[in-house]
């Protein structure tokens, strides 16, 4: 893990923990290099269903996931150096990550991931709503990309007012929440 790029230093403060998360004992804080092993475990957790269908030995799966995590981390750090890289914790346990780029013309949710046992509790919705409120106050929209076969996430984003738009890929659908929606 020591060979991974460090998270970029940010001048502006990270996003505040939404009240909904605070009320349930969660804290949103800036990610640091020491979080990388837990972030790798989170990444592996998000791909567990996919990896269960692969007939590889456990060591091969672990190596593949470590390589994919390193590539994704490098991409995020190099291409979104101006983003806030945050982790979601509860009782000292890393439960998720929220990478958010807060620049004009629209905020970009670079990544939102939660451990399986933390999904479906409204945590992601609370983070997105807080982002929408901040963006709206600045006259900005919010953009994101969602894995095309992640129907649950797509439904959540649609409930929050996101609309599918051009600019996606074979694997990801681009979605946008325009400013002015409530």
Image (cartoon, rainbow, N blue to C red):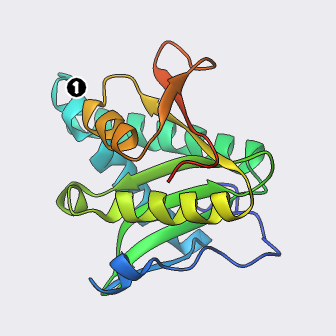
State left or right for residue 10 relative to residue 37. right
Q: Residue 178: horizontal and vertical position, in percent? A: 61, 41
Q: Is residue 180 visible?
A: yes
Q: Position of residue 87 (x, y in %)?
A: 48, 69
* Position in image of residue 22 (x %, y %): 37, 85
Which quadrant holds the N terminus? bottom right
Give the residue displayed 32% in from the left and 43% down from the top.
Answer: 156
**Residue 70 placement (x, y as % from top left):** 56, 44
Q: Determine whether 102 is above or below 33 in the image.
A: above
Specify whether 98 is left or right of 13: left
Q: Residue at x 19, y 35 (%)?
A: 49
- Residue beneath disc 1: 56
Instruction: Judge whether 7 appears above or below 19 on screen.
Output: above
Which residue is at a point 42% across and 71% down the rendered structure image?
Answer: 88
Disc 1 packing (10 Å; few <14; some 14–19; many ≥20): few
Mark 1: secondary structure? loop
Q: Residue at x 35, y 85 (%)?
A: 92
Q: Quadrant of residue 152?
A: top left
Please give the count of numbered marks on the rendered protein.
1
Residue projecting furthest to the top: 170
The answer, for residue 3, to whether it is visible in the render is no
Q: Nearer the viewer, residue 135 or 153?
A: 135
- Against 181, residue 165 (above or below) is above
Q: Nearer the viewer, residue 10 or 138?
A: 138
């Amino acid at each position: 893990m020591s060979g991974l790029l460090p998270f970029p230093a940010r001048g502006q403060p990270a996003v505040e923990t939404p009240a909904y998360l605070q009320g349930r004992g969660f804290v949103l804080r800036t990610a640091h290099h020491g979080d990388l092993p837990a972030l790798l475990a989170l990444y592996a957790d998000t791909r567990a269903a996919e990896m269960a269908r692969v007939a590889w030995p456990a060591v091969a799966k672990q190596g593949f996931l470590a390589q994919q995590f390193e590539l994704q981390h490098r991409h995020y750090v190099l291409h979104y150096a101006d983003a806030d890289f945050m982790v979601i914790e509860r009782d000292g346990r890393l439960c998720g990550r929220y990478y958010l780029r807060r620049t004009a013309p629209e905020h970009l949710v670079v990544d939102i991931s939660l451990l399986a046992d933390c999904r479906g509790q409204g945590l992601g919705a609370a983070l997105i709503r807080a982002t929408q409120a901040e963006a709206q106050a600045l006259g900005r929209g919010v953009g994101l990309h969602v894995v095309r076969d992640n129907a649950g996430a797509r439904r959540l984003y649609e409930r929050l007012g996101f609309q599918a738009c051009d600019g996606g890929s074979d694997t990801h659908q681009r979605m946008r929440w325009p400013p002015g929606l409530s």
